[in-house]
Amino acid sequence: MKKHPLDLLSLIFGLVFLLIAGLWTVHRTVDVDLPPAGWFVAGGLILVGLLGIGSIVRGVLRGDRTAVESEHGGADTQPPVQG
């Protein structure tokens, strides 16, 4: 199976859609009474998760860029000069 490049815009819209649908589902089914400190903990966990996703996406984009350069005869494919 051929690996296709990451479409960042589609990924962002998909994640936003899932977030909205998930929040709507949780709001309709669960009655959570969290104290104000609980919201800070929940927000921190969400932030850590988003940072993890961001680092994965950044790594994928960085890896794709080097793969494209090597396919088109970039600097990575040149033999070292001896002299």
Image (cartoon, grey):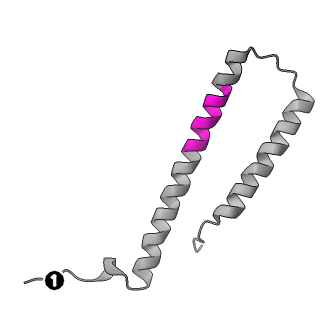
Q: Hey, which residue is sitting farthest front in the picture?
A: 36
Q: Residues within 10 Å of mark 1 (few under 14, many from 20)?
A: few
Percent across and percent down for residue 59 are 48, 57
Range of magenta residues? 42-51
| Quadrant of residue 3 within the rendered picture | bottom right
Side of 56 relative to 23 (left or right): left
- Position of the N terminus, as image quadrant, is bottom right
Residue shown at the point (88%, 31%) measured from the top left: 27
Residue at the spot of label 1:
81
Percent across and percent down for residue 80 are 19, 80
Percent across and percent down for residue 29 are 90, 29
Residue shown at the point (71%, 23%) measured from the top left: 39
Q: Is residue 59 above or below residue 24?
A: below
Side of 31 relative to 40 (left or right): right
Q: In this view, does 45 lie above or below 34?
A: below
Side of 62 relative to 42 (left or right): left
Residue shown at the point (32%, 79%) measured from the top left: 75
